[in-house]
C-alpha cells in the first residue's frame, strides 16, 4: 500500500481558501471592516509577534462565532460549488487522479477548516485532516476543537489517523514552511511541484 498526502491551500488550490471562505460567508464589506478592526492581531502575526494559531483563532471567532451549524453547512456547500472548485490547480487534480489510478490512499492535510474541506473532499473521494471548529448546541463557539493543523501538528494528526510505517511508500506535496514536517516524513517530496 502507498500513501499520498496533499496540503490544500496553495498546493491543490491557486491561493489560500481560508480568506476566500470568510469573504464568501460574511461578504467583502464585513471582511474589510473586520480586517481593519483586527489589524493589530494581523500585523502581529505578519511580523512574528503572534503565532499563526492565535491570529487565526481571533479572526475566526470574530467572523464566525454564533453561526448555526445549518447555516454553516449550507454556506460551505455553496462555497465549494461557487468558489472553491474554480480555485483548483489542474496539475494538482492530475496528480491526485494519478494516485487514485494507482489505488494509493490519498489524504488532504490542511490548516484550513475540515468542516468545509470535507465537502470538497467527499466530491473527489478523498480523506481529509484539517483544523476542526468547535460546536456547542449546533452553534460555532468561535474556538477550534483541535489545534491548528500546521507544521508539526500535521504530522501528529496524520500519525493519529494512521501508522506511516504501514505504507511501503509515502508521497507528500506542499508549498509552505507549514508543510516541511509532513514533507520530511515522505519518501517522495513535492515542494511546489508535482
Image (cartoon, rainbow, N blue to C red):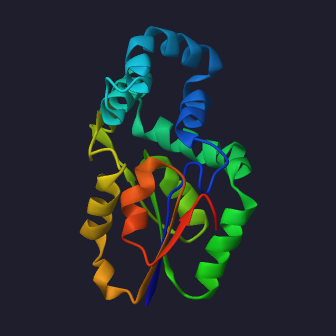
Q: In the image, what residue occupies the spot 65% across and 72% down? A: 95
Q: Can residue 114 be seen from the camera position used here?
A: no
Given residues 50 and 12, the one toward you in this image is 50
Residue under the point 60% across and 81% down: 100
Q: Residue 191 at what x, y percent from top left?
A: 55, 61
**Whole-percent x and y of residue 46?**
44, 25
Quarter of the image for the N terminus: give it: bottom left
Instruction: Please state the total of marks drawn on the protein image.
Output: 0
32 versus 163 height, above or below: above
On screen, residue 171 above or below 19 = below
Q: Nearer the viewer, residue 23 or 11?
A: 11
Q: Residue at x 49, y 57 (%)?
A: 118
Left or right: 73 with respect to 182?
right
Quarter of the image with the C terminus in it:
bottom right
Q: Nearer the viewer, residue 171 or 86?
A: 171
Question: Is residue 42 visible to us here?
Answer: yes
Q: Name the image quarter holding residue 109.
A: bottom left
Q: Foreground: 98 or 179?
A: 179
- 60 on left or right of 117: left
Give residue 24's position: percent from left, percent from top.
61, 31
User: In the figure, 115 relative to 173: above or below?
Assistant: above
Q: Residue at x 38, y 31 (%)?
A: 56
Q: Quadrant of residue 143?
A: top left
Amino acid at each position: 500500500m502507498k500513501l499520498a498526502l496533499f496540503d490544500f491551500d496553495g498546493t491543490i488550490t491557486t491561493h489560500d481558501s481560508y480568506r476566500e471562505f470568510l469573504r464568501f460567508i460574511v461578504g467583502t464589506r464585513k471582511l474589510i471592516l473586520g480586517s481593519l478592526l483586527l489589524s493589530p492581531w494581523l500585523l502581529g502575526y505578519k511580523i512574528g509577534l503572534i503565532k499563526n494559531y492565535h491570529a487565526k483563532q481571533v479572526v475566526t471567532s470574530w467572523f464566525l462565532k454564533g453561526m448555526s451549524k445549518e447555516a454553516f453547512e449550507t454556506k460551505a456547500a455553496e462555497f465549494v460549488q461557487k468558489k472553491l472548485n474554480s480555485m483548483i490547480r489542474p496539475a494538482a487534480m492530475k496528480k491526485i487522479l494519478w494516485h487514485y489510478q494507482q489505488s494509493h490512499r490519498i489524504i488532504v492535510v490542511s490548516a484550513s477548516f475540515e468542516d468545509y474541506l470535507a465537502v470538497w473532499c467527499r466530491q473527489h473521494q478523498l480523506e481529509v485532516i484539517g483544523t476542526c471548529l468547535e460546536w456547542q448546541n449546533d452553534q460555532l463557539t468561535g474556538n477550534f476543537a483541535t489545534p491548528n493543523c500546521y507544521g508539526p501538528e500535521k504530522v501528529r494528526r496524520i500519525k493519529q489517523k494512521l501508522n506511516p510505517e504501514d505504507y511501503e511508500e509515502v508521497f507528500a506535496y506542499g508549498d509552505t514552511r507549514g508543510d516541511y514536517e509532513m514533507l520530511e516524513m515522505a519518501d517522495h517530496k513535492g515542494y511546489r511541484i508535482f
